[in-house]
Image (cartoon, rainbow, N blue to C red):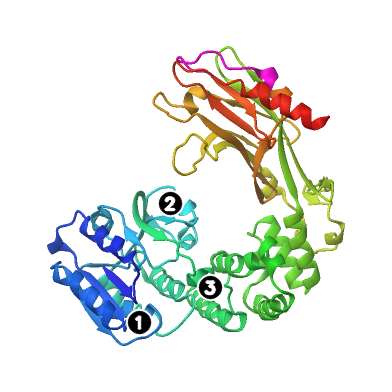
């Protein structure tokens, strides 16, 4: 393992402890702590770690100020068959190294992308839906995870001279990993086993606002690498779309765009607008989601004020999910009908009109009407519309919040969404959960809204309580803020008359 180190904090102990919990014998793996000129205090700390562990070596290096050079020195010094890069604030799951090495041995992998788990951060999920012994760049979701936290065959890195750039280079991870992806014979994804814990800490480099003039030349270096290894066409467009969407268009979206100071926004647009014209052909736009296609069309047309207006339109949309009827069946199922509204300035925000060709065109934002081509057509996105009903924000006394899926409806009629919940599947026989809120996750035309479900107490009161289900009962209860909770009776216990009290409070507020 190669670990770049610079003045580590207390969480470094968690990393070392995770090395001690690996199931590989200590004679079968080594840990290279590559100290980037941290000074005497860190040197003493690392020396003590190595003194008590025969498989740990410390490399004392001049200060470079960035992790690329320490990682390169680690690869040069590595004696193992594989190199796993680990950052000093992260840690490995128990047995991860053995699972990764076994998977690489089994499939002859040059690169293994082990399942990463975000600690305090959200991570892409599509890449880790299933194991892929031989993943294909451009077809499988390899670009979703371009961090260096992967297992690489040491001889493969050396034979292809795959290195991190020295010095302070933004997107150095992307440069390194893409070199490896283009050179590899076999790239594997191990999704079925958690391997790497990627921990979010305040003040990390990724959380700061970029400097446009210095950041985007580094992005161009990544784009140069893609261009050098692909021919014009579908594969290149698909790869370039990843950076266009993630590094440019997302920075111009919604709340992020709206919060920029005007001077910073102008600096950003002055840099990215010519970059887009030069580096991203029209074929790149075709695979973008509907909101990004609109954003891209405005950017290409030089309509900067409308880009801001579009960001305001997105953030000012209001989504509301309301229970219009609720009933328990004799078999114990809970049947709900919901109405979802998405409005802007009191009017329907997302209204589509069927064109003569059968396409669905957005017509509710008239100031976008003159956008060219298919920028306002959302057929693919509308076919992917869905509503997921979940239990969230648990108030049972358990530590932490979580979610439980209840029901899903695809391509819904937002005016009447009918779902059925089975409490016996929601609450297991040993479940201690007593109460949780109903939340709706609504995907509409490429936008996603996470909203609480609302209901008036009269509607819920008419539903009553569930029949006895394995000695338990459930009920829907209106909360003081107009939300909805699903509450379960403890075995042998009694449900409080909370529904009646909530209804009386609601009626009192209406008087």
* Nearer-N-terminus badge (2/1): 1
Identify the residue at image location x=49%, y=43%.
Answer: 401
Query: Residue 386 location, x and y as percent?
Result: 64, 40
Q: Please indicate whether residue 246 sits to the left or right of residue 470 in the image.
A: right
Which span is picked out in magenta?
A: 461-473
Crowding around mark 1 (Cα neighbors within 10 Å: few <14, some 14 to 19, many 20+) is many
| Residue at the spot of label 1 | 69
In front: label 3 or label 2: 2
Above/below status of 271 relative to 369: below
Q: Please name whichever residue, 445 or 467, is drawn nearer the observer in this view of the structure.
A: 467
The residue that appears at 67% across and 43% down in the rendered structure is 383
Q: Which residue is mark 3?
A: 231
- Asked whether the residues under the numbered discs 3 and 1 touch, taking CB atoms below 8 Å apart as contact, a structural biologist would say no
Q: Which mark is residue 128?
A: 2
Residue drawn at (85%, 59%), measured in percent from left and top?
Answer: 369
What's the CA distance linking mark 2 and mark 1? 29 Å
Residue 510 as seen in the image, left or right of residue 71: right
Q: Count residues near mark 2 (Cα–Cα under 10 Å), then give few for <14, some for 14-19, many for 20+.
A: many
Looking at the image, the residue that sits furthest to the right is 366
Q: Nearer the viewer, mark 2 or mark 1?
A: 1
* Helix, strand or loop under label 2: helix
Which of these two is toward me, 452 or 347?
Answer: 452
Q: Residue at the location (43% across, 51% down)?
A: 128
């Amino acid at each position: 393992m190669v670990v770049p180190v610079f003045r580590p904090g207390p969480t470094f102990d968690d990393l070392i402890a995770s090395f001690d919990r690996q199931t590989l014998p200590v004679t079968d793996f080594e840990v290279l702590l590559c100290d980037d000129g941290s000074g005497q205090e860190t040197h003493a700390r690392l020396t003590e770690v190595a003194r008590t562990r025969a498989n740990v070596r410390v490399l004392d290096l001049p200060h470079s100020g960035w992790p690329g050079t320490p990682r390169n020195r680690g690869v040069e010094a590595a004696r193992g068959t594989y190199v796993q890069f680990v950052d000093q604030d992260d840690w490995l799951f128990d047995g991860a190294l053995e699972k990764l090495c076994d998977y690489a041995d089994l499939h002859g992998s040059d690169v293994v992308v082990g399942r990463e788990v975000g600690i305090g951060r959200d991570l892409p999920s599509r890449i880790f839906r299933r194991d892929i012994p031989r993943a294909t760049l451009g077809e499988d979701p390899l670009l979703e995870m371009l961090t260096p936290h992967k297992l690489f065959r040491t001889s493969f890195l050396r034979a292809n001279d795959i290195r991190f750039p020295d010095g302070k280079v933004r997107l150095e991870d992307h440069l390194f990993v893409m070199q490896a992806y283009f050179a590899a014979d076999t790239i594997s994804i191990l999704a079925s086993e958690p391997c790497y814990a990627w921990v979010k800490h305040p003040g990390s480099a990724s959380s700061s606002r970029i400097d446009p003039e210095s950041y985007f030349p580094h992005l161009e270096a990544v784009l140069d690498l893609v261009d050098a290894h692909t021919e014009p066409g579908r594969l290149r467009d698909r790869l370039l779309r990843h950076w266009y969407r993630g590094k440019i268009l997302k920075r111009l979206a919604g709340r992020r765009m709206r919060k920029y100071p005007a001077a910073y926004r102008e600096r950003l647009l002055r840099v990215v607008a010519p970059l887009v014209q030069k580096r991203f052909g029209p074929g790149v736009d075709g695979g973008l989601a509907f909101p990004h296609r609109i954003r891209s069309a405005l950017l290409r047309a030089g309509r900067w004020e409308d880009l801001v207006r579009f960001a305001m339109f997105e953030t000012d949309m209001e989504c509301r999910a309301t229970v219009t009827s609720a009933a328990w069946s004799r078999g114990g199922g809970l049947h709900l009908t919901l109405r979802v509204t998405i409005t802007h300035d009191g009017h329907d925000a997302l209204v589509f009109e069927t064109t003569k060709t059968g396409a669905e065109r957005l017509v509710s934002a008239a100031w976008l009407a003159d956008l060219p081509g298919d920028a306002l057509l959302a057929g693919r996105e509308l076919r992917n519309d869905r509503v997921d009903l979940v239990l969230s924000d648990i108030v049972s006394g358990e530590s932490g919040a979580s979610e439980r899926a209840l029901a899903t409806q695809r391509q819904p009629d937002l005016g009447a969404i009918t779902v059925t919940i089975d409490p016996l599947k929601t609450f297991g026989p040993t479940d201690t959960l007593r109460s949780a809120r109903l939340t709706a996750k609504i995907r509409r035309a490429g936008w996603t809204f996470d909203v609480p479900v609302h209901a008036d107490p009269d509607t819920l009161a008419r539903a009553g309580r569930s029949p006895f289900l394995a000695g338990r009962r459930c009920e829907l209860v209106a909360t003081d803020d107009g939300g909805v909770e699903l509450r379960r009776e403890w075995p042998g216990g009694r449900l409080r008359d909370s529904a009646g009290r909530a209804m009386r409070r609601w009626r009192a507020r209406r008087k």
